[in-house]
Image (tube, rainbow, N blue to C red):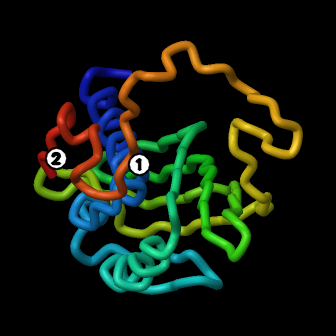
Amino acid sequence: MNLDELSDLAEINGVLFRYCRGLDRMDKELTRSCWHADGTDDHAPLFVGTADDFLEWLWPVHAGMELTRHVVTNVVVDLQGDRAGTECYWSLTFRTATNTGSVDTQSGGRYVDMFERRDGVWAITHRRSIREWSRTDEVVEPTDPAKGQRLIEAHSPGAEITSPARDRSDYSYTALRATY
């Protein structure tokens, strides 16, 4: 593998990771940058259509959740000049409020993507999401009040906690500049 191919692989992986970050931070512009203008998405039976329409459908769905966590692994890339096919495994956690607390829905599957490099930019032309499993569990915090014991004892209980945010106020934006 030569340096150009390694660079292509790094750029394609960057798109896959950027997609996850964009969704979890509710950064629509960052997420949209993962597709070319004419890109399409197939999350059947939930959604099939253009990338723009996918994000319009998805955004209110994700906004109703307390948190989302998208992770991609096992990335395989088949480079073919200015085109590439990819497969990566995804795992998702969605936290949703209920009348009695919260539940975490966890799912796993694969994204199979077609990429193209246009004007020097790698982006998705078509994504198909293949869900392979899913489960939902009640959220149990690190303290189990029923048993009156802590599952993890804090070393620095007075330290200021960095809270996550699902927008550009998240601490990660102090270190990472969006250049897309």
Amino acid type of the residue tagged 1 in the rendering = Leu
Q: Which mark is residue 178?
A: 2
Horizontal and vertical percent position of residue 173 = 21, 41
**In the rendered image, is residue 80 in sight?**
no
Q: Position of residue 81 (x, y in %)?
A: 31, 46
**3D distance between C-alphas at marks 1 and 2:** 15 Å
| Quarter of the image where one finds residue 73 | top right
Please give the name of the residue rendered at 68% of the width and 73% of the height, measured from the top-left corner.
Answer: 98
- Horizontally, residue 91 falls left or right of residue 113, namely right
Work out whether residue 168 or residue 161 is closer to the camera in this orientation and state it: 161
Side (left or right) of 20 relative to 129: left
**Which secondary structure, mark 1?**
helix
| Element assignment for label 2 | loop
For disc 2, the neighbor class at 10 Å (few under 14, some 14 to 19, many from 20) is: few
Q: Earlier in the sequence, mark 1 or mark 2?
A: 1
Q: Residue at x 39, y 42 (%)?
A: 163
- Circle 1 sits on which residue? 16
Which amino acid lies under the numbered mark 2 shown in the image of this protein?
Answer: Ala
Residue 82 appears in view: yes
The image quadrant of residue 79 is top left
Q: Nearer the viewer, mark 1 or mark 2?
A: 2
The circle on residue 165 is none
